[in-house]
Image (spheres, rainbow, N blue to C red):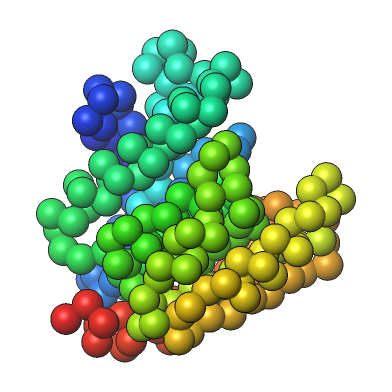
Amino acid sequence: MEKFSYKTPDGVTIHGIHNSPSSIAKTVICFHMMPATKESYIPLMQELEKVSWLAAAIDFRGHGESTENRTLDWHNFDEDEHQKYLIDAEALYEEMLKMGKIDALVGASIGANISLVMQAKYKIASSVLLSPGLEYHGIETIPSAKHLDYNQSCYIVAAEEKRSPQLPREAQILFNTLVTSQKQIDIYPEDLHGTNIINDYPDRINKVVTWLNENSQQQMKYQE
């Protein structure tokens, strides 16, 4: 994985990694869950590289390498500071847009909520949401689910969590609210959250890759 960094409009340096496909057919951005880091997406990014997807993942401010020499720590954030992850995500979107269109977003937990918000705002064709909630630190999903376009697509992945038993129900509510033409939901029986639902299961990673590939024709048609 190659490293990169950029500055947000409010002056925070965000660190990320990207894979290196020999040719680039599509581009996807990945947003981690808390308290994970960008490296939680390496298994998925490696598989996407094999099918010519350029994939980038970042550490949100206060996580991983994006701590401004330890002056930022997500443990100390209030709600407003957690919501600034959206600034980090949108700044990455603007940076990557310079290389061409963004075809998809993948997010886990609060990263999933951010992905859906951005999908609706920027009309990004496809998203994969791992353990999305109706609300994480004030970042809500129902308004964005209602404002997706019919030609966009969304794949929701959740699990039967013991710590957060409401999440499978919330995932189903979100799925039912989506107004997209292509949507899918899988709820697995293990007590897992976010990227942990897929990382130790190659078949589940492959299912995510297949979902993204199978929607690529629709994405091209939508974004032209």
Give coordinates of residue 5: x percent, y percent: 27, 35
For residue 168, side relative to residue 121 (left or right): right
Q: Say which quadrant the C terminus sits in.
A: bottom left
Residue at horizontal 49 percent and vertical 66 percent from the top: 145
**Residue 36 at least partly seen:** no
Q: Camera-side residue: 87 or 150? A: 150
Question: Residue 174: which quarter of the image?
Answer: bottom right
Residue at horizontal 22 percent and vertical 53 percent from the top: 96
Give coordinates of residue 31: x percent, y percent: 46, 49
Residue at horizontal 34 percent and vertical 38 percent from the top: 88
Q: Is residue 220 above or below residue 80?
A: below
Give coordinates of residue 162: x percent, y percent: 86, 50
Residue at horizontal 36 percent and vertical 76 percent from the top: 149
The residue furthest left is 98
Q: Camera-side residue: 70 or 206? A: 70
Q: Is residue 42 above or below residue 211?
A: above
Question: Residue 215: which quarter of the image?
Answer: bottom left
Question: Residue 168: which quarter of the image?
Answer: bottom right
For residue 148, side relative to residue 43 (left or right): left
**Residue 179 at least partly seen:** yes
How many numbered discs sit on the rendered protein?
A: 0
Give coordinates of residue 125: x percent, y percent: 34, 73
Q: Is residue 203 above or below residue 66?
A: below
Q: Camera-side residue: 201 or 196? A: 196
Q: Camera-side residue: 200 or 74? A: 74
